[in-house]
Image (cartoon, rainbow, N blue to C red):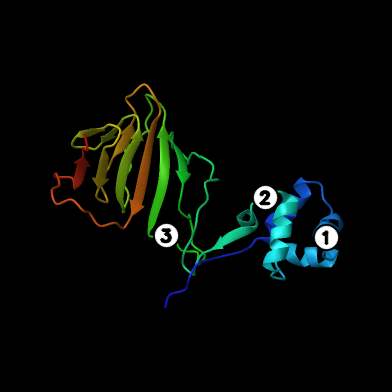
Amino acid sequence: MGQESSFKLNGEKIRELRRERAWSSTALAEYIDVTPAYISQIERNLVEPSLSVLRKLAKALNVELLALMEYGAPEGVFISTGEQEERTFPQAHAKYQLRTPAVLKSGEKPDISFMVVKIESGQTDYDEMVCHDFVEFCYVLEGCIEYRTPKRTYRLEEGDSIYIQKNVSHLLYNPGPEVATLVGVLGSLHPHWQQEDGEGTVRRDDH
């Protein structure tokens, strides 16, 4: 059987909540009827308190019980939170929010990268066309976008998507009046479309 995921106590979260409420470890210990040393062990993840103690902690800190827990994924599984900040890569005009790990624990790069991209009205993602050795899939969440290649321009409206084979030069441009928001997936993916143009580019229109 494969390794299963589970929830486990997050001692650092308990310490953070305690300090936010200006509680000393002694005061919290007295409130839930344990010793200050036991609170210290809990916050350092050195012990696994009973369910009754966890319930007292949640009540004292005025949070749901699950707020004291963290999700433990099996080996080889990586979870991203919604806290990543938007950033601009060097020479890029678009803003990117990477939703997958940039580097794995082994130091290797992941096979795919998933990101949310925002491009201002009248702006391109880069000054010149870019070309990379991995495939690219893009889905337009809001606004419209033009994927410009050496042979033609593909206009994508909200709900449209495009798949581009590796080593196809392209440039993104937002011709619309509002910010365009895209979902981009880069990596070693397998195409699900059977018809392609001469550039290995497929545009899908769901309208």
- At a point 29% along the width and 56% down the height, the residue shown is 189
* Cα separation between marks 1 and 2: 17 Å
| Amino acid on which disc 3 is placed | Pro
| Amino acid on which disc 1 is placed | Ala
Q: Helix, strand, or loop for circle 3?
A: loop
Please give left or right for residue 124 compared with residue 5 in the image: left
**Quadrant housing the N terminus:** bottom left
Residue that badge 2 annotates:
63
At label 1, counting other C-alpha atoms closer than 10 Å, the crowd grade (few under 14, some 14-19, many 20 or more) is some
* Cα separation between marks 2 and 3: 36 Å
Residue that badge 3 annotates:
110
Q: Which mark is residue 155?
A: none
Question: Which is nearer the N-term, disc 1 or disc 3?
Answer: 1
At label 2, counting other C-alpha atoms closer than 10 Å, the crowd grade (few under 14, some 14-19, many 20 or more) is few
Residue 46 coordinates in the image, percent (x, y) = 72, 70
Please give left or right for residue 130 compared with residue 57 in the image: left
Residue that badge 1 annotates:
29
Residue 33 coordinates in the image, percent (x, y) = 82, 63
